[in-house]
Image: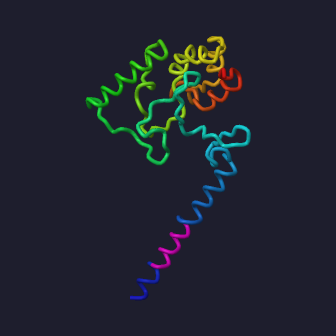
């Protein structure tokens, strides 16, 4: 019996050390060496204080800021997730209609799809360039700024699709809002 048990225990301990200790340490070390900012959460600081991550959405509701995609989880990282409502669900249809009406009233423009639908995680930090551009006039008015200048700042913070092929141009909401605060502070 020991001849069968010893190899099983040895293999279990060996693979536990390999997959539970050596592999995670190697991957963590490689991530820290090759991508330190991303490995540490892509944290954004202002005046020495961490105010968020470039990878996780935050709620912005003031007129002078870009607004993120809707979140089914209230932008909380712990309860992140989608509503899991199907496309024919009456609650989803009503929610999208309500968001569309609010967006149009607030921005004076038709709502792009990402402005009325929550993402799967509820924490997408980016919005489409189309969504950001549609919010520029509202932001400029709230900040007493030239709409063309706000559009230019948004364009400067627009990230092109990967390799020019995959995805669509996107704007990071938190980073752009910080740039808006620096360039065109909100009136007191």
As displayed, is residue 145 above or below residue 128?
above
Q: Residue 184: x and y, percent?
A: 68, 20
Q: Which residues are magenta?
A: 9-18
Image quadrant occupied by the C terminus = top right
Looking at the image, residue 149 sits to the left or right of residue 69; the answer is right
- Across and down, in percent, residue 104 comes to 43, 16
Q: In terms of secondary structure, what is the magenta stretch mainly?
A: helix
How many numbered marks have been drawn onto this rendered protein structure?
Answer: 0
Q: Is residue 51 magenta?
A: no
The part of the image, by quadrant, that contains residue 70 is top left
Which residue appears farthest toward the front when viewing the image?
188
Give 5 or 82, whichever is nearer the viewer.
Answer: 82
Classify residue 151 as left or right of residue 84.
Answer: right
Most distant residue in the right direction = 47
Q: Nearer the viewer, residue 152 or 142?
A: 142
Farthest bottom residue in view: 1
Residue depicted at 67% across the width and 26% down the height: 181
Q: Is residue 123 above or below residue 172?
A: below
Q: Quadrant of residue 84?
A: top left
Corner quadrant of residue 100: top left
How far from the left and from the top, in percent, is residue 41?
61, 46
Q: Residue at x 64, y 25 (%)?
A: 157
The image quadrant where one finds the N terminus is: bottom left
Front position in the image: 45 or 88:
45
180 to the left or right of 91: right
Of residues 180 and 158, the one drawn nearer to the viewer in this rendering: 180
What residue is at 41 percent from the left and 25 percent from the top? Answer: 116
């Amino acid at each position: 019996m020991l001849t069968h048990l010893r190899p099983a225990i040895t293999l279990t301990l060996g693979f536990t050390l390999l997959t539970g200790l050596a592999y995670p340490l190697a991957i963590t070390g490689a991530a820290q060496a090759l991508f330190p900012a991303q490995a540490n959460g892509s944290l954004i600081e202002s005046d020495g204080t961490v105010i968020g991550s470039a990878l996780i959405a935050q709620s912005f509701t003031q007129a002078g800021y870009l607004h993120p995609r809707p979140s089914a989880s209230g932008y909380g990282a712990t309860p992140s997730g989608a509503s899991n409502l199907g496309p024919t669900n009456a609650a989803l249809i009503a929610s999208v209609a309500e968001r569309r009406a609010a967006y149009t009233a607030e921005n004076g423009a038709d709502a792009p799809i990402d402005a009325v639908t929550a993402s799967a995680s509820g924490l997408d930090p980016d919005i489409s360039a189309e969504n950001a551009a549609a919010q520029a006039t509202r932001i400029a008015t709230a900040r007493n700024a030239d709409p063309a200048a706000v559009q230019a700042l948004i364009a400067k913070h627009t990230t092109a699709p990967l390799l020019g092929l995959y995805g669509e141009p996107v704007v990071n909401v938190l980073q752009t809002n910080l740039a808006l605060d620096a360039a065109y502070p909100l009136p007191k």
